[in-house]
Image (tube, rainbow, N blue to C red):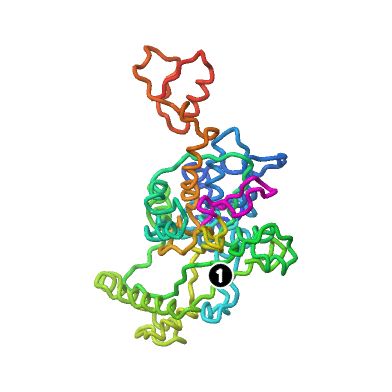
Amino acid sequence: MRNVGPSMATMCGNQLFLFMSILERYVNGRCDLVDPCNRITDTKHLDDSYDFIVVGGGTSGSAVAARLSEETKWKVLVVEAGGIEPTPASVPAWFAAYWSRNDTDWNYFTEPQTKACLSKGGKCPWLRGKMIGGCSVINGMMYMRGHPADYDGWAAQGSTGWSWAEVLPYFMKGEDNKEIDSVVILAGGTINSPQILLLSGIGPKETLSKFNIPLIKDLPGVGKNLMNHVGLSLKFTLSKEPEVPELNWSSAMEYITERRGPLSSTGLSQSTNPLDPPLMQPNYFKDEHELNVLIRASKIAYQLANTTLLREKYGIKPSKDWASECGNSMRPTNEFFRCVAQRYTEPENHQVGTCKMGTDSMSVVDPELRLYGITDFNLAKMIRAAEVCGCPLQEVGPSMAGSCGSQFILFMSILESFVNGRCDLVDPCNRVTDRDPLDDSYDFVVAGGGTAGAIVAARLSENPQWKVAVQ
């Protein structure tokens, strides 16, 4: 894998070049921040076959591949278009350094909008990470599980096993679930997963026919049902807040030693060429209700800015002349907020829905994330979409688990019932049990039955002449 992204030394101007160069070398030597010895490397020569092929090394793909690789008998191949996660990405404050770069971002833009992103010619940028780790490298590091009503709604619509009560345990703990057979796990994300399916001949037959792509399966929902959160830019000035440089040895050491301080914060197909960006049409503000919601949200933001604490301690006030073409930012009206929303649109990075999970005619995957009608697909015996592109409806909040984040947790959760019933995956008869009473002596005593302890104990136990105890 190639290293991608800018050097820390070149990111802050000439006046900080030396400081950033030294800081970068220091960070590179900290194994609690980066682990150069265990970073992923390219496979120079591909094997003839693999047990699992993970398409996409992003957030969910990396997590799935890592878990599958814990089983030493399985061969796992990760196919990723980008390079290795940049070293500075370990520092949260640098997440925005990788936006809109060809080597770290797919640089996608929506189709021209008539009511949104007007200050940018109507084309809204959609950030999508192109590297190991995917969007988790470039997002704002806000994690939420999502609202219980969303999951209950999915279950009510036929996605059995996805109610809040059923998925909550898997948010709260990690499961060492595994799967067998030759499996392709499609983890290209909300944008690229449907693109891959369409180019493979899986999708609406009229779309495939338009581009002369041989039809394998007519799935009308592939690439449809696209949803994303959207906001707007409002600017405020802090008149009583002193200018404090964030980049100094004090802030650097505070983050490195305590993970605190300023550096810890963050503040579909139109071509048969897989390298061409897919067509993305969000239809922002097509429904007037969407604009009305942002107008109400803007009023709340102004009310918060006018609270005693923010006003008196920080001197916060609307920035003068911000969006002056829309009106007076100091005395905003509904029309001012409406204009700002349409001109200075802020599309979030929370796209979902393009490989909808469910049981209706527009569903692409079933509640176990299996593609409908592709059980005998020629690339594998089963394809699973480990993505929130399978989420049938947009979640209420900006959730890591519901956008570009820990889809893997939910992906693995729906496998539990499948796994527990497979003796070739788990063997309840041979699982470890308590020993009571203990023998008088053992050849080996392993203190701790965690990942390393369990592996060591298992290897030692392969010699039938040794007695091994795990505490």
The spot of residue 438 in percent (x, y) is 36, 16
The residue that mark 1 highlights is 125
- For the residue pair 421 and 105, the one nearer the viewer reads as 421
Residue 348 shown left or right of residue 380 in the figure: left
User: Mark 1 is on which residue type?
Assistant: Pro
Assign the C terminus to one quadrant of the image: top left
Please tell me which residue is depicted at 53% across the width and 80% down the height of the picture: 119
Give, as a single range, the part of the protein colored magenta: 366-388
Query: As displayed, is residue 126 above or below residue 306?
Result: above
The spot of residue 64 in percent (x, y) is 54, 46
Query: As displayed, is residue 345 above or below residue 159?
Result: below
* Main SS, magenta residues: loop
Tag 1 secondary structure: strand
Please tell me which residue is depicted at 40% across the width and 43% down the height of the picture: 173
Query: As displayed, is residue 82 above or below residue 418?
Result: below
Asked whether residue 86 is in view, the answer is no
The spot of residue 337 in percent (x, y) is 41, 81
- For the residue pair 94 and 427, the one nearer the viewer reads as 427
Please tell me which residue is depicted at 55% across the width and 40% down the height of the picture: 179
Asked whether residue 56 is in view, the answer is yes
Query: As displayed, is residue 104 above or below residue 182?
Result: below
- The reply to whether the magenta stretch includes residue 371 is yes
The spot of residue 350 in percent (x, y) is 49, 63
Residue 6 appears in which quarter of the rendering?
Answer: bottom right
